[in-house]
Image: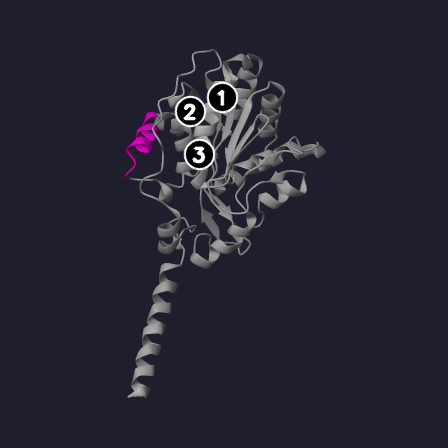
Amino acid sequence: MIKKTFIGLASIITLAFAVIYFLSRPTLEDDGSYSPSSLALKLGTVSVTDFEDIKYEKYQGNRSKILVIFTEHKNLEMENGKMFSTGNHPVEALVPMLHLQNAGFDFEIVTPTGKPVVFEMWAFPSEDKNVKAIYHAYKTNFEQPKKLTDFITDSFDNDSSYAAVFVPGGHGAMIGIPEDKNVSKVLNWAHQSDLFTITLCHGPGALLSTTLDNEKFLYDGYKMAVFPDAIDEMTPLIGYLPGQMKNGVSERLKSLGATIVNTESDNTVCVDRKLITGASPSASNELGKIAANTLLKELK
C-alpha cells in the first residue's frame, strides 16, 4: 500500500513538472522569433491596467508638444542566438501618454528611420478601454511615423513648441537606439533646451547613446529608476525571454555614474532635475502622473 502511494505521488509530481515545463516554454512565432510563454504572460501581463483617469488642469501654453521616440525593430537577439519578439511595451508607452494627453499635451511620433512603430502586442491590455482608445487615436501615426532625422532638421530650431522627449520602454528600446547618434543629438538638444526627458523600464537604454564618439555620459550623477539586469537574468526561467540577453541596461548606466534607485521591477519612479524615469511596466501609471504633474508645475 505504501509503495503504491509513493508511485502515485511520483506520478503526480512528474505530471506537475511536465505541465510547468510546457507552460514555461517560449512561444515560437512564424518569423522564428520567440514571444513569452503562457506562464510568463500570466505572470507578467494584464488585460486591464491600473491607469487612473485624472482630470488635470490642462496646459494652455506654447510648449504643448512631446516628442516620442519609438523603436521600429521587433527581434532582439539573445546570447544563444534566439530572437526575442519584442518592440515597444504598449502599457509603458500608452499609459504615460494618456496622462500627458489628459494634461493638455500632444505627441509627435518618430522612429529612427520612419518605419512603423512596433509594439509587443502580446502585452497589449485588450480589455482596457482607455489604452485602446489612445492606441486607435494615434494608430495612423504609429503606422506612418516621422523620421527622427527629419525632426532634427525641421524642429531643432523651434524648441519653444516642445515640453519633453519621451522614450517608452520594452526590450525593443535596446535595439539600435542606444547606438543611434541621432538619439544622442535629440537627448543633448533636450538637455540644452531645458526640456524634460521621460523614460522607463528598458527605455533608459537610450541614455547610453550620449556616450557615443567618446562623449561624457550626459546623465553622470543622476538618480534614475531602470529595469534591473538581475530580473532580466531570471526571466528565462519562466520563459519570458528565450535566453540570456547580450547586454543589460541598469549595470551599464550604473558604471557610467548613474545612481539606480530601485532593485525590483516595481512601480518606483524618480525625478532628478529634468529626467523622469520609472522602473518597469508596473510604474507606467505612476510615471504618467508624476510626468504630467511635473510638467504642469514647471511650465506655468
Element carrying mark 3: helix
Task: Name the main secondary structure of what is drawn in magenta.
Answer: helix
Residue that badge 2 annotates: 100
Mark seen at residue 286: 3
Residue 104 at x, y = what percent? 40, 18
Q: Mark 3 belongs to which amino acid?
A: Glu
Q: Nearer the viewer, residue 144 or 297?
A: 297
**What's the distance in space between the residues labelled 2 and 3, CA to CA?**
12 Å
- Classify mark 2: residues with Cα within 10 Å, few (<14), some (14-19) or many (20+): many
Q: Mark 2 belongs to which amino acid?
A: Leu
Residue that badge 1 annotates: 295
Where is the N terminus found, in terms of image quarters? Answer: bottom left
Q: Nearer the viewer, residue 159 or 54?
A: 54
Residue 245 at x, y = what percent? 54, 51
Magenta segment: 127-137
Q: Earlier in the sequence, mark 2 or mark 3?
A: 2
**What's the distance in space between the residues labelled 2 and 1, CA to CA?**
9 Å
Residue 6 at x, y = what percent? 34, 82
Against 60, is 28 above or below?
below
Q: What residue is shown at x 55% (from left), y 51% (from top)?
A: 230
